Amino acid sequence: EVQLKESGPGLVQPSQTLSLTCTVSGFSLTDYSVHWVRQPPGKGLEWMGVMWSGGSTAYNSALKSRLSISRDTSKSQVFLKMNSLQTEDTAIYYCTRGGTTVVTAYVMDAWGQGASVTVSS
Amino acid sequence: DIKMTQSPSSLSASLGERVTISCRASENINNYLSWYQKKEDGSVKLLIYHTSRLQPGAPSRFSGSGSGKDYSLTISGLESEDIATYYCQQGYTPLTFGSGTKLEIK
């Protein structure tokens, strides 16, 4: 069974760095990509970035200067780090699995339950 | 970035009714369009990808169509379990989503 689970602190202070971990099971990170998506309260879904199966990354240009995605394939984990957090970064953060073909690389066919992150002092 | 304009933002329909949600891209996205269902508990499921391909496990009452800039999701026979918010998403990086359609039972 394919599973993704986000973990990390629920509360982060303004100007600090957010670190989230996505632990996956049921598939290999070297076969599938992992995307990060967030949803601020009352707003829509925002794509943050992706760790492609080959190890390269792509980021939302609006977040690129603050965002870093990395992975540890031996532990089946993908990491998100975002610095200089502000209150508008308060959101539910999801990791999702992307497909393996040209047609499905952008398709998120499995989602984690989401991690709630509040930015507040 | 490609902007996705989704309509309506909310929709109230009766059980058994046929429901259609629309999405328009700011440029041609060549059928790279997916639809997702987000429930109140926060869970998200893929329903349709590449415009019209039904994700395994998604109910067959869901269907998608479209081309170029214009796409739609249809639910043929609304069921109570379909109460959710639906999002379209285009497939060129940076990936972008529509603003969502909240579906309620009338």
Image: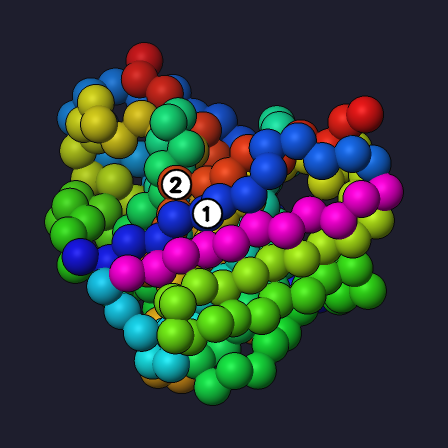
Q: Is residue A21 magenta?
A: yes
Give the mark nearest the N terminus, 1 or 2.
Answer: 1
Please tell me whether residue B89 is drawn above or below residue B94 in the rendered image: above
Please say whether residue B34 is visible from this viewpoint. Answer: no
Q: Residue at (31%, 74%) from the top-left corner?
A: A28
Q: Chain of mark 2?
A: A
Q: Is residue B36 magenta?
A: no
Q: Chain of mark 1?
A: A
- The quarter of the rendered structure image containing the N terminus of chain A is bottom left
Residue that label 2 marks: A113
Q: Residue at (39%, 48%) from the top-left corner?
A: A5
The answer to whether residue B52 is left or right of residue B66 is left
Any mark on residue B23, and which? none
Query: What is the secondary structure assignment of the residue under circle 1?
Result: strand
Residue A111 drawn at (x, y percent) = 37, 51
Query: What is the secondary structure assignment of the residue under circle 2?
Result: loop
